[in-house]
Image (cartoon, rainbow, N blue to C red):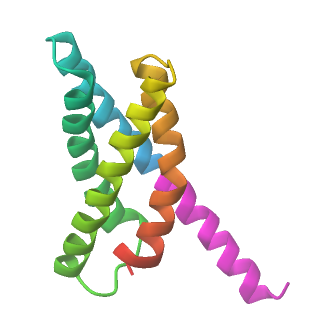
Amino acid sequence: MNRDSVRFWLAECWRFTLHVLTGVLAVLAHYTLMAILLHFGSNALLATTIGFAAGAFTRFLLSYFHVFEPTKGASVAVGRFLVALAVQAVANGALFSAFLGLGLSTWPAQIATTVLLTFANYAMYRLWVFR
């Protein structure tokens, strides 16, 4: 491996680490709002969908300003992020519902969904949204 390759992979590992850390903050926003809604009697699927939106807003701001280096400006990134969110929202709801159907309770289903989507989200953000 040459020096440029090593630098590339170190930078990529750092970027993924930041993605995960900002993801933790986005998940906190998602789960906090979800927990509040569940506490007040909301349907679990509605609660995770609304929580997802709060997490998405948090994720965009942190990703745009602290993780990635967008080359096309905020308006392009916002448009692409909204498309990515639509894909993620469908995937979140589908995975969450599938895990519930398999017998997992609400929180284990949501945690499993979050873990699985972390890797797909990073690839989508890195290769398209914030490019």
Reply above or below: 61 against 131. above
**Which one is in front, 36 or 98?**
98
Magenta stretch containing residue 18, yes or no?
yes
**Which one is in front, 99 or 62?**
99
Residue at 31% in and 67% down: 64
- Counting from the top left corner in percent of width and height, residue 17 is at 56, 55
Reply above or below: 83 against 108. below
Magenta-tinted stretch: 1-20
- The quarter of the picture where residue 7 lies is bottom right
Reply above or below: 12 against 48. below
- The quarter of the picture where residue 60 lies is bottom left
Quadrant of the rendering where the C terminus is positioned? bottom left
Residue at 34% in and 86% down: 71
- Counting from the top left corner in percent of width and height, residue 48 is at 27, 32
**Which one is in front, 130 or 105?**
105
Q: Main secondary structure of the magenta part?
A: helix
Left or right, 77 with respect to 27, comes to left
- Counting from the top left corner in percent of width and height, residue 40 is at 14, 11
Quadrant of the rendering where the N terminus is positioned? bottom right
Residue at 61% in and 72% down: 11
Magenta stretch containing residue 52, yes or no?
no
